[in-house]
Amino acid sequence: MCVREVKLLLEPMFEAMLSSTELGTLVWRIERVSDYSNEVELPDDALIAPNEAWVRWEVLGEAGGSGSLRLDGGSNALISFVHSDLQDFIAESRFGWGELRGQHGQ
């Protein structure tokens, strides 16, 4: 799967989980995880190997991310994995403290 395809899968999840104000501040990218001290954003046409990349985001000035992307379980598993990390991020953020946002698939 390439970066562009992963972005297309994840965009609706961000749109469903974030308010319009939060979405307006969202900056996100897919980075290589091989060197944590020097994250490298992957270009849209790059192929992603299992556990090679992670999703990094910033919302209302707060940074978060989702660990090594697991692509071997298919699209739904990938979305669920990132959705869970985004939900945890929101619930621990200043802007969404304690909130449980829309469940994946709803």
Image (cartoon, rainbow, N blue to C red):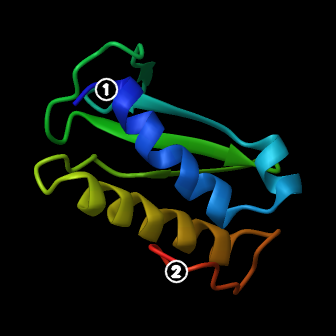
Residue 24 quadrant: top right
Left or right of 84? Residue 24 is: right
Left or right of 38? Residue 49 is: left
Image mark for residue 103: 2
Towards the viewer: 3 or 66 = 3
> Which class describes the residues within 10 Å of circle 2: few (<14), some (14-19), or many (20+)?
few
Q: CA distance from mark 2 to mark 1?
A: 33 Å
Tag 1, which secondary structure? loop
* Residue type at tag 2: Gln
Towards the viewer: 100 or 6 = 6
The residue under label 1 is: 35
User: Does the rendering let one see residue 38?
Assistant: no
> Which class describes the residues within 10 Å of circle 1: few (<14), some (14-19), or many (20+)?
few
For marks 2 and 1, the one nearer the N-term is: 1
Towards the viewer: 86 or 67 = 86
Tell whether label 1 touches label 2 (CB within 8 Å): no
Q: Residue at x 46, y 37 (%)?
A: 8
Left or right of 11? Residue 32 is: left
Question: Picture coordinates of residue 43 (x, y %)?
Answer: 41, 13
Choose mark 2 or mark 1, whichever is in front: 2
Give the answer, above or below, for where 35 lies relative to 60: above
* Residue type at tag 1: Asp
Residue extending farthest right: 21
Residue extending farthest front: 106
Q: Residue at x 45, y 35 (%)?
A: 7
Question: Picture coordinates of residue 81 (x, y %)?
Answer: 33, 63
Image mark for residue 71: none
Give the answer, above or below, for where 46 lies relative to 33: above
Classify the position of the N terminus by image quarter. Answer: top left
Question: Picture coordinates of residue 57 (x, y %)?
Answer: 60, 43
User: Does the rendering let one see residue 39?
Assistant: yes
